[in-house]
Image (cartoon, helix red, strand yellow):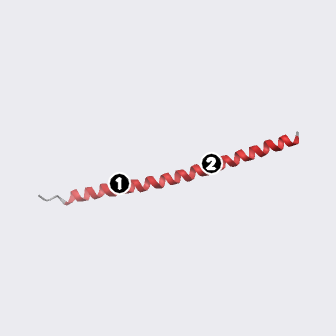
Amino acid sequence: MTIPIWVYAVVAGIIISALMAIKTGREERLMEMENIEKEGEIYITRLEREKEKREMERATE
């Protein structure tokens, strides 16, 4: 009993599709982490500026 060649093609397509999905998922996670880090840095910078502003206001009182 032989297996038709199109079955091999379908199996190969499924494997390639799974590998691409894993690769894309990893890349998206990395990009998301970089974006979260950038947003965190912006937030921390804003908090530091607000803290400095409050300290300056207290010093002038």
Helix, strand or loop at label 1? It is helix
How many numbered marks appear?
Answer: 2
What residue is at 69 percent from the left and 49 percent from the top? 45
Residue placed farthest to the left in the image? 1
Label 2 Cα crowd, 10 Å radius (few <14 / some 14-19 / many 20+): few
Front residue of 3/47: it is 47
Front residue of 8/26: it is 26
What residue is at 40 percent from the left and 54 percent from the top? 22
Residue type at the position of mark 1: Ala
Give x and y (percent) for residue 4.
17, 58
What residue is at 21 percent from the left and 58 percent from the top? 6
Q: CA distance from mark 1 to mark 2?
A: 33 Å
**Quadrant location of the C terminus in the rendered image:** top right
**Quadrant location of the N terminus in the rendered image:** bottom left
The label on residue 43 is none
Compared across the picture, whether 17 is left or right of 32 comes to left
Give x and y (percent) for residue 2.
13, 59
Label located before the other in sequence (1 or 2): 1
Q: Give the residue number, with chain letter if any, for mark 1.
A: 18
What residue is at 47 percent from the left and 55 percent from the top? 27
Compared across the picture, whether 43 is left or right of 57 comes to left
Helix, strand or loop at label 2? It is helix
Residue placed farthest to the top in the image? 61
Give x and y (percent) for residue 9.
25, 59
Give x and y (percent) for residue 11.
26, 56
Q: Give the residue number, with chain letter if any, for mark 2.
A: 40
User: In the image, is residue 21 above or below residue 56?
Assistant: below
| Tag 1–tag 2 contact (CB < 8 Å) | no
Residue type at the position of mark 2: Gly
Label 1 Cα crowd, 10 Å radius (few <14 / some 14-19 / many 20+): few
Q: Quadrant of residue 12?
A: bottom left
Front residue of 5/49: it is 49
